[in-house]
Amino acid sequence: MKTVIIGGVAAGMSAATRLRRLKEDAEIVVFEMSPNVSYANCGLPYFVSDVISNRSDLLLQTPTSLYNRFRLDVRVGHKVTKIDPAAKTVTVLNLDTQEVSEHGYDNLVIATGAKPRRLDIPGIDRALTLRDVVDADRVKALVHDAGPQAKAVVLGAGFIGVELAENLAHLGVDTTLVQRGASILSQFDAEMVEPLQAHLVANGVKLITNATPHEITDTEVVLADGRRIHADVVFSATGVVPDNALAKDAGLKLGPTGGLWVNERQQTSDPSIYAAGDAVEKQSELTPGAALVPLANLANRHGRLIADAIAGKATAAHPALGSIIIGAFGVGAAITGLSEKAAVKAGIAHTAIHLHPGSHAGYYPGAKRVSLKVLFDPETGRLLGAQGVGMDGVDKRIDVLATAIRAGMTVDDLMDLELAYSPQYGSAKDPINHAGYIGNNVLHGTTPTIQWHELPQALANGRILVDVRTEKENGAGTIPGAINIPVDALRDHLEELVGQQVVVTCQVGQRGHTATQILRGHGIDVVNLSGGYVTWKSAQDALAR
Amino acid sequence: MKTVIIGGVAAGMSAATRLRRLKEDAEIVVFEMSPNVSYANCGLPYFVSDVISNRSDLLLQTPTSLYNRFRLDVRVGHKVTKIDPAAKTVTVLNLDTQEVSEHGYDNLVIATGAKPRRLDIPGIDRALTLRDVVDADRVKALVHDAGPQAKAVVLGAGFIGVELAENLAHLGVDTTLVQRGASILSQFDAEMVEPLQAHLVANGVKLITNATPHEITDTEVVLADGRRIHADVVFSATGVVPDNALAKDAGLKLGPTGGLWVNERQQTSDPSIYAAGDAVEKQSELTPGAALVPLANLANRHGRLIADAIAGKATAAHPALGSIIIGAFGVGAAITGLSEKAAVKAGIAHTAIHLHPGSHAGYYPGAKRVSLKVLFDPETGRLLGAQGVGMDGVDKRIDVLATAIRAGMTVDDLMDLELAYSPQYGSAKDPINHAGYIGNNVLHGTTPTIQWHELPQALANGRILVDVRTEKENGAGTIPGAINIPVDALRDHLEELVGQQVVVTCQVGQRGHTATQILRGHGIDVVNLSGGYVTWKSAQDALAR
């Protein structure tokens, strides 16, 4: 039995090594068009800045090491140019010798990945992209030649763009990050990504949002509004698209997303041809239909699954949730499941809560703020998504929430999660439990809550806004129009509020919750502003960019 | 409606503040026998060493702040001496004035916590304990008076004992930690806690295991085997017992564990009397019956639940899983659910796997080893428990596993968890996914595996042991009797192994997995040693203490 695999990185190599483990006698040939296999593509931006200084650290395996351990026939610098599903052959071009050969297969695995999306503007050829180690070498050399006095422009503030900008700034390069949308990292809601945006700017990255690149000249990037940015080096990181030309030419079915269609055993429309990784679309766990989810963990998982399928094991892919994290200058931002804008777009009913607890017990030194947003179904409480941002402990909370979402838990269930606590690691009421408590209060009507984007309408409808923080906090900045009655003084000011419709706000929402209960206890119609001043301020700052 | 609460820390104060939020007009009186309420008892060991330098950081609330915000009537230095369930009254002694008073209640909440277990040996009165801020003040003063030349002995290597030992060593105090059992932290399996034990010793803590204290003299601790340890200061941290004398005297039902019995609404056998926290036993999630689980998160959760119950909300406590973490000198050790010894004791069938992945991608600087042990049901794969130890990322993995166990997930489900990955936070195959892959291979018979404690019997039964690491690794230390055939050379040595029964071992189990598949592919009867040399060595080191 002969299996041919096109692509020797995450999905392809997971399929190859797993298949060898399951079938010692299988014939396995891997064609990889770049000169390297099993390279750490998620590490490439960090190699550019020498955070990863040793190039060999990026090369996790070589054809020789893979032969020695797994008896894999790995051919780098070999580009598959054609698949013939009827004949069960692939045509291969040796990029070194230009020799063309044909290879039969019993099973074929397509793991061709995704390629950078190409902007259709004049001068785009000058823009560098970052897909493989060869690209990284080129970028590193150019940045080195240009020197720390160079000015760089990065087009696109997705994950690769932001990581590139961080690493260029690390090198002292004057870096401008240009984003078409209103904020970076379009997977996130604006108020959640704002702390990371502010942190990028504080660390010297020049951020231009709502900007469309128009042209790249020899010295500049020109925006559609006429702004010109000097650019010794230009990077294009405006997203990726499935690299499925081969599959398309072979007549394999593509999905509505443009990704290659596969069934739950990762089989394409030709049952002898499997596919996984960024070239392929995934079924979505939380929304109807398919989505492109170009993530390394799914590529590895589904590559392994293909080997199981070829070996005849019972197996099936799970619909994709999508969990992502990015870190820059020490701030992490992570998301799992639906953002609020994704829920709105998909027409999925949702309630959102915001909270800003500490990464560990406040009385133990070094706690950092973890800002969380959690979405759940307004009827059942079923968790739909979560986002987090902060300097510590964000990854942990999003991973717990990703697990809870996968398990079909409700926001109430978060109250009862028993998470490991000692003061340097968490809190007796972990941020996750806090989210459960807050969600429980909102879901069951204990504390009616509004979002920052609902505030203007609430005020227009005649609600008055009461800032229940201290006079000092209020003086340092508050929401326009708020009157200040500290929560501890609220019971002495009831007569001013009876008969009014009120919105209360505090710093993060917790005193607002207490204030809501006090006022409700005295018959006053009141709602709490979710996430308080911190969330509101992040949203305003994001809108002002 | 008047609610009296006995105990003003975690459970008691959670009940009090939640009840006020739900009932603005409730009368709420809290009696706390110590001079402080809402203090951070988990921070006390760190206050002793000035890691938490500011005493006021431990005092999260005061009676005045609680009155101002919540209109709570909090009386510190007030000891409840009697409960009369028939009359619905409590008798209270003012420890300051010695005045005795009686107070009626509609609902009573018992949150009296746990007290240090007292060793019944001569001289025990000299031993210090650490339950509240007053204790911490006394300890701090004594340690300060004794000076850094002092020698301290800590009896008991549970959580408080280990934390105390760490903090005393931080102060430069010569510290000996005496443990009755074979290893510290009896919740853990020995091989899992060994890296922390070794780390304590490497950081100057003298550890004596398998030792029974016999007597405390004015200058020494004398062990049952006659050994004498000079001790200027002695601490007793030999566990805690529910502080339920009051409840017992009032005729309330105690459970089989000695903890106060409650139903799922936290009601005692008297429906007007609720109880939560360390005084109370919990129903166990994974084993039949009740258990003592003296943890702060459950105390807070159940305190809140009592308020909901009193306010008439639908609510029910979830059976307890028990998740714990401790950190010392930068190494964390955490557990959730069942240890292997707990599973054995409870007669619960289980399969255990060991793994030692990195805390994040190996190609990104700073990754640390995370050693994990995961238990699951041998038939269904249902997760039963997990332990972790390491310098980074242990808390995250145990929290994810605690969530997965609570959700009823199987070890197979861990393969499909989508955890947030970028190279500084995790791996494309996160340690959790790895556990899933390994468990999947074991559960479904792909890679038959044995544990370190099963190895002697396997060898006695005639299996030969093959170390498949490199010659260099083998030379640096291996399991006695192992022959060395590196995995990459295995296919060239098949004739030596055909017809044999084999155990393969490597460093952490991963190459052993590949070796197992190679040999099985050639018809050889082979099993892999779970966790490889690292787990085996930890177990031997633990046994040798």
Image (tube, coloured by chain):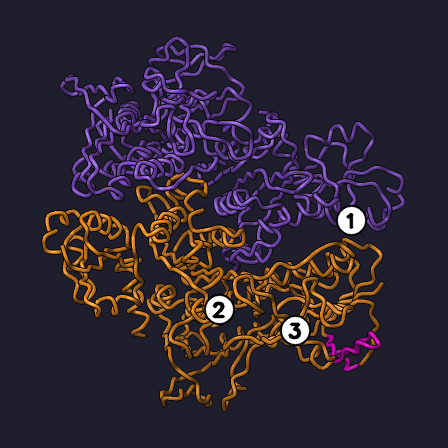
Chain colours: A orange, B purple
Q: Secondary structure at mark 2?
A: helix
SS at circle 3: loop
Q: Residue at x 41, y 76 (%)?
A: A177
Name the residue carrying label 3: A260
Relative image position of residue A445 (x, y in whole percent): 32, 52
Q: CA distance from mark 3 to mark 1?
A: 32 Å
Q: Which residues are magenta?
A: A78-99
Label 2: how many Cα within 10 Å (few below 14, some 14–19, many 20+): many
Residue at far top of view: B122
Q: Mark 2 — on which chain does it sit?
A: A
Same-chain status of marks 3 and 1: no
Q: Which mark is residue A159?
A: 2
Residue A271: x percent and y percent?
Answer: 77, 68
> In the rendered structure, which amino acid carries the disc numbered 2?
Phe
Report how far apart the C-alphas of labels 2 and 3 lie in the structure. Answer: 23 Å
Image vertical order of residue B504 relative to residue A486, above or below:
above
Quarter of the picture containing the C terminus of chain A is bottom left
Q: Earlier in the sequence, mark 2 or mark 3?
A: 2
Question: Which of B279/A71 is in front?
Answer: B279
Locate residue B239: give its quadrant.
top left
Q: What numbered label is drawn on residue B517? A: 1
Q: Is residue A432 left or right of residue B69?
A: right
Q: CA distance from mark 2 to mark 1?
A: 38 Å
- Amino acid under disc 1: Gln
Residue B452 appearing in the image: yes
Q: Dot 1 falls on which chain?
A: B
Residue A306 lies, with reference to residue B270, above or below; the image says below
Q: Same chain for the residues at labels 2 and 3, yes or no?
A: yes
Q: Is residue A82 magenta?
A: yes
Q: Give yes or no for residue B120 being in the magenta stretch.
A: no
Q: Relative to residue B57, is residue A69 drawn left or right?
A: right
The reply to whether residue A164 is visible in this rendering is: no
